[in-house]
Image: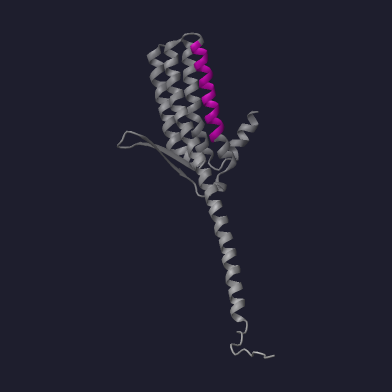
């Protein structure tokens, strides 16, 4: 219910950033739905919506993703014209607040689903102008969602690799310690007398 949502934001480590993360998504939907119901001219509501979508994309990509879930992504085009993904992630995932995490991901997925349903509804009604705007909204939203999804997977792989390295180093340390102790034990024992007595029959 509403109380659960309020409590979720109250328990966030960055409540203002969490609100900012959701604000432009809700604003974009409000502008679109209100102008569609009021039958305002296409150009008059298309431009404000696109501006809000672009601001939301920039805010999520450069601010809220870094502060709420400790992730950052960007995409470079190499000299060969190929797309190159680059990722950054927080060193200690345990430092991420669970409420921040939930607000970030749930709002991303929910917003994408809502615009997807709006797109289907417009497609069934053959509302071409509306479909263009929905396509812009989905393109920006999905770009961020895919970027952060890839970044999250990359962070998980780094974490698993780090754990495996620690386990390997720990195992090597134990083996090295046991080998060293065993060698020290052998060295501390009295040497065999070289002057061996040979018994004759």
- Label the magenta part by its dominant secondary structure: helix
Question: In which image quadrant can residue 102 be found?
Answer: top right
- Looking at the image, the residue that sits furthest to the front is 201
Q: Residue at x 58, y 68 (%)?
A: 177
Question: In which image quadrant can residue 139 be found?
Answer: top left
Identify whether 145 is placed above or below 50.
below
- Near-viewer residue (192 or 66): 192
Q: How many marks?
A: 0
Q: Residue at x 43, y 18 (%)?
A: 133
Identify whether 71 is placed above or below 27.
below
Figure quadrant of the C terminus: bottom right
Q: Residue at x 44, y 38 (%)?
A: 63
Question: At which x and y percent is residue 189?
Answer: 62, 82
- Near-viewer residue (116 or 77): 77
Q: Residue at x 42, y 22 (%)?
A: 136
- Looking at the image, the residue that sits furthest to the left is 79
Q: Which residues are magenta?
A: 104-123
- Near-viewer residue (22 or 140): 140
**The magenta stretch spans residue 138:** no
Question: At which x and y percent is residue 114?
Answer: 54, 22
Question: At which x and y percent is residue 146?
Answer: 48, 32
Figure quadrant of the N terminus: top right
């Amino acid at each position: 219910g509403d109380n659960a949502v309020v409590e979720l934001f109250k328990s966030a480590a960055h409540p203002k950033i969490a609100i900012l993360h959701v604000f432009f998504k809700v604003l974009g939907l409000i502008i679109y739905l209100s102008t569609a119901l009021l039958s305002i001219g296409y150009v008059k509501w298309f431009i404000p919506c696109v501006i809000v979508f672009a601001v939301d994309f920039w805010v999520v990509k450069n601010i809220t993703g870094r502060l709420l879930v400790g992730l950052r992504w960007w995409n470079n085009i190499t000299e060969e014209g190929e797309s190159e993904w680059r990722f950054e992630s927080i060193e200690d995932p345990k430092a991420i607040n669970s409420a921040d995490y939930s607000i970030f991901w749930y709002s991303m997925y929910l917003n994408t689903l809502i615009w997807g349903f709006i797109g289907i509804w417009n497609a069934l009604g053959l509302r071409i102008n509306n479909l263009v705007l929905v396509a812009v909204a989905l393109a920006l939203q999905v770009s961020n969602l895919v970027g952060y999804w890839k970044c999250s997977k990359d962070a998980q792989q780094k974490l698993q690799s780090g754990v495996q390295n620690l386990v390997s180093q720990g195992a090597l340390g134990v083996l090295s310690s046991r080998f060293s102790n065993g060698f020290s034990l052998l060295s501390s024992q009295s040497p065999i007398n070289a002057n061996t007595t040979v018994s004759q029959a």
